[in-house]
Image: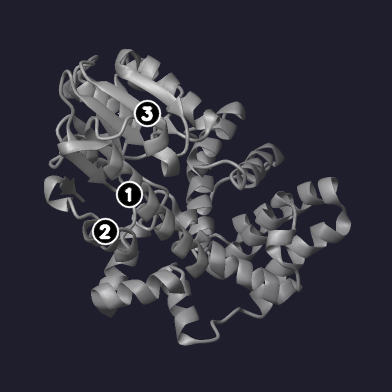
Amino acid sequence: MGLQVERRHVKAFLEVLEWSEHYKPFQVVKRRVMARYGLLGSSYDRVFTAILYRLYRMQGILDRVVAERTGLRPERLPAALRQALRLSALLALTGSGKTRDFDEKLVESVARIIAARFGPSESRLVVGLYRDLLSRPWAPRDNLERMEFELMLPRIVIERLERLLGPDGVKRFAEAVNVSQPLLGLRVNRLKASVGEVLRELERAGVEAWPSERVPWHIVYRGSLNYSKFKPLIEGKAVPQDEASAAAGFILGARQGELVADLCAAPGGKTTHLAELSYNGAMIVALEIYSDRMARLVELAIRTTTITSIYPVIGDALRASALLPRERFDRVLLDPPCSSTGAIAKHPDARWRLTEEKLARLVENQKRMLAQAVELLRPGGRLLYTTCSVLPEEGEEVVEWILQQRASAESIALYV
């Protein structure tokens, strides 16, 4: 690898690693930090981004390795030190002869920064872990751990997907979510631009892009795009949104004169899409519990000129029927918190946050929120329940539950 390892570059990368622990999605943190250091879009940015994705895909395995070899629990360490140790383990486990010189210099440079912040003993931990793993390579202890390492998936996901898809299906799923450059998307705002106009801007930015074959007014692209300098995003002509997420708006729809509720609405991609589809003629009530996330929704609505039809309400979707009129809404959208197992290509860190206990809590809240959503719907209205999860517990089984619970289910047009 021909890149020189300079302290400024490594400092930027360690800053990305540290702050991505606190703010999600980590891609936003990466773009902001790299832009501040003047590295966004550079060869360093591309190399560090690839390492960052690998680290988060293997985070659960790396934490296990760090704990075994150092005797420390990563979750109890400061974020910068925890990420430095994960990085050392990653480079030792996945590096090759072609990258060895770069990897060693990167580890040593990170260790010097750690020494300045925490002290020499922490610095020696970082370098010592890397060298220990090179001299005594780590090996999985059982078949499931071997599969976790090879597929870069936690056992809770492997076990469930094996029951659903079989062993070959799990492997194909892993191949799909572990691609080096996941496909990304932009929804074109029909109130301000055309698909052709945004495609031409992407071409000028040197990004490979094409119109979606599944969702109208949507563009799929592959590559690095500087969001802070891309005019269609700045001007609200396009909105970052994956193809599946953009499909939700078209499935639910919104027409002039209708009353629509979007529960768990922030950061506002679907909310603004519904307003756009109605040409600002519908009344879109956006319910969101977190004020900082609501601020992002409002900012997006202003930028896309959909704010005139969006009515922000701070509140909990678990209490939606107490906060909003019951049996009045023509359409209701519920996109509740979920395991994000269907979005781990773009958000690889999400796979290692899931536990049996967390899944049970998520499902319970999804059911409670869906029951609240039904209370808002007028007779003959339309309800869309959607999650970015591939697990039946969070999808089909939640819908089956609400249909069993509701004696009036026949009057509900329910779409999954």
Residue 308 image-quadrant placement: top left
Rounded to the nearest angstrom, the CA distance separating label 2 from label 1 is: 9 Å
| Of residues 284 and 407, the one drawn nearer to the viewer in this rendering | 407
Q: Name the residue under label 1.
A: 371
Q: Residue at x 63, y 72 (%)?
A: 65
How busy is the neighbourhood of tag 2: few (under 14 within 10 Å), some, or many (20 plus)?
Answer: few
Q: What element carries label 3?
A: strand
Residue reaching furthest to the right: 120
Q: Name the residue under label 3.
A: 286
Task: Please determine whether, in this image, residue 303 is positioned above or below residue 370.
Answer: above
Q: Which residue is drawn at 22% across and 20% down?
A: 282
Q: Mark 2 points at which residue?
A: 405
Asked if the residue under mark 1 is in contact with the one under mark 2, i.e. CB atoms within 8 Å, the reply is: yes
Amino acid type, callout 2:
Gln
The residue mark sitting in front, 3 or 1, is: 1
Amino acid type, callout 3:
Ala
Q: Which residue is drawn at 86% across and 60% down?
A: 121
Which is more N-terminal, label 3 or label 2? 3
Which is more N-terminal, label 1 or label 3? 3
Amino acid type, callout 1:
Ala
The residue mark sitting in front, 2 or 3, is: 2
